[in-house]
Amino acid sequence: MTPAQTALLQALSPVLGDKGIVTDPALIAPWEIDWRRRFSGRAPAILAPADTAQVQAVLRAAAEHRVPLVPQGGNSSMVGGATPPADGSALILSTRRMNRIRRVDAGAGMVVAEAGVILADLHAAAEADGARFPLTLGAKGNATVGGLVSTNAGGTQVLRFGTMRGLTLGVEAVLPDGTLYDGLSALKKDNRGYDLGQLLIGAEGTLGIVTAAALRLAPGIARGATAWVGLADPAAGLTLLRRLQAASDMIESFEIMPAESLAAAVAHLPGARSPLAGAHPWHVLIEAVTGDAQADPAAMLEAQLARALEDGLAGDAVIAASEAQAEAFWLLRHSLSDAERALGPAVQHDIAVPVDAMPRFMVEAAAACDARFPGTHASGFGHLGDGNIHFHVRAAPGTDRDRFYAEDAAVITRFVHDLVTAAGGTISAEHGIGQMKRDELARLSPERVAAIRAIKAALDPHGLFNPGKLVACA
Ligand code: FAD
């Protein structure tokens, strides 16, 4: 521990108490490594404030002692965004004790939740009030409100409800100098100059700590239907999606995966099986939902899928016959990342291209990667309707894990990102930049990088917030 860190802990001890300061290395260890086990670091302590006032006290003291902090929620970042630096120079600031739902108002369509509230708990709180929070993702049991806001997370309902930016009505945050930004008023219109809340959405912990957020709720579900469809290729998937969207405004999710990803999920989950009997090169999972008890999403899906089967657009299709079956379908989808992780080292690319270009990109980019890096294997799955897939390149069997991440990964990533850039896309659709893609941020125009640096320097002049992530401090 550095002398500055020791002084900081002494100053904070009366404020945070025993529960708020963790120095036992065994308790810290799980939070020093990322979900994918690709990045690891060292933090001499975790600071865990219980409320916004305590966050203010921590940030004031950290500024005074010039101690860098790594904001952390559920530690489910896919880009090493919440992992501390290796040299032990930073402490983790965990929001997990700040887990109160301050207010749920289904009538007003909003919930105010503290940063450490876990997504699954937010879902439960909204449902208990007859509403729902319409964003979900595979890490819903870990990801927190603060992390979701700070990464502008997406997930499987973006098609209908947008990302966190669209779902966030207001943000409460503590800025690096310890001042409180109270943007929770949730006004529908407010044009009083710069919107700091919008800046904090997607800031990846580099501009301060999000302490709470006012979030939009959707009406509860009156009726829903879940379908699984087998297809020849991603182009057929996009045609099907367009048809469904033209026929109905109930389409909420449309997730695509190749047969090999489905097979990996089936093998990974005890007792799981493919929803369709036959073999199909590609699969899509479709969710249609309505708050209108008179509407019939199952009938709509049935009619559209019958047409798709008749004219050869789809190879086979099934509509879940029960809630349990629908849940089993979703479990397969949400296990794809876990299943893929279990297959061994792989480089992940969370990329987007224009939606119409995605079917071609999925097929051609995978073929180009396989040809360029013999022995590796590339494939993508995810949010076809958003033009966003998770494009993974798995190491050749027997490759040394450390060498793969230390040497091969950067070369592969540059190749994939070149393809994405040529297709007019983005190298980060939803996971953020973190430390994994920091060097690739140089693909932005120099003017845009300079603007990011200027904002960072203005709000965090000592470079104390999430060092080494998003953008290198000048
Ligand atoms: P952490 O991982 O703890 O932190 C993420 C970033 O936010 C870090 O930069 C951290 O410093 C910062 N941060 C955290 N809390 C705060 C705070 N209170 N104030 C300021 N900064 C903060 N993401 C998607 O968008 N879509 C998906 O479909 C998706 N699927 C996933 C599936 C799996 C299996 C996993 C493991 C992850 C997935 N993710 C997905 C990524 C991840 O879940 C999201 O990025 C999530 O938003 C991170 O939340 P967290 O609380 O775990 O944040």
Image (cartoon, rainbow, N blue to C red):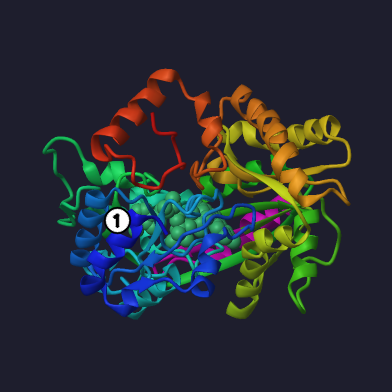
Residue type, mark 1 in image: Val
Image quadrant where one finds the N terminus = bottom left
Asked if one can make out residue 249 in the rendered structure from this viewpoint, the answer is no
Point 56% across, 30% down: residue: 425
Asked if the magenta segment contains residue 46, the reply would be no
**Quarter assignment of residue 216:** bottom left
Point 60% across, 74% down: residue: 327
Q: Position of residue 70 (x, y in %)?
A: 40, 54
Asked if the magenta segment contains residue 303, the reply would be yes
Q: Which residues are magenta?
A: 286-309
The one nearer the camera, 348 or 70, is: 70
Query: Left or right: where does residue 316 sit relative to residue 69?
Result: right
Q: Position of residue 163 (x, y in %)?
A: 42, 49
Respond yes or no on whether mark 1 lies under 8 Å from ligand 1.
yes
Image quadrant where one finds the C terminus = top left
The one nearer the camera, 170 or 244, is: 170
Q: Which residue is mark 1?
A: 210
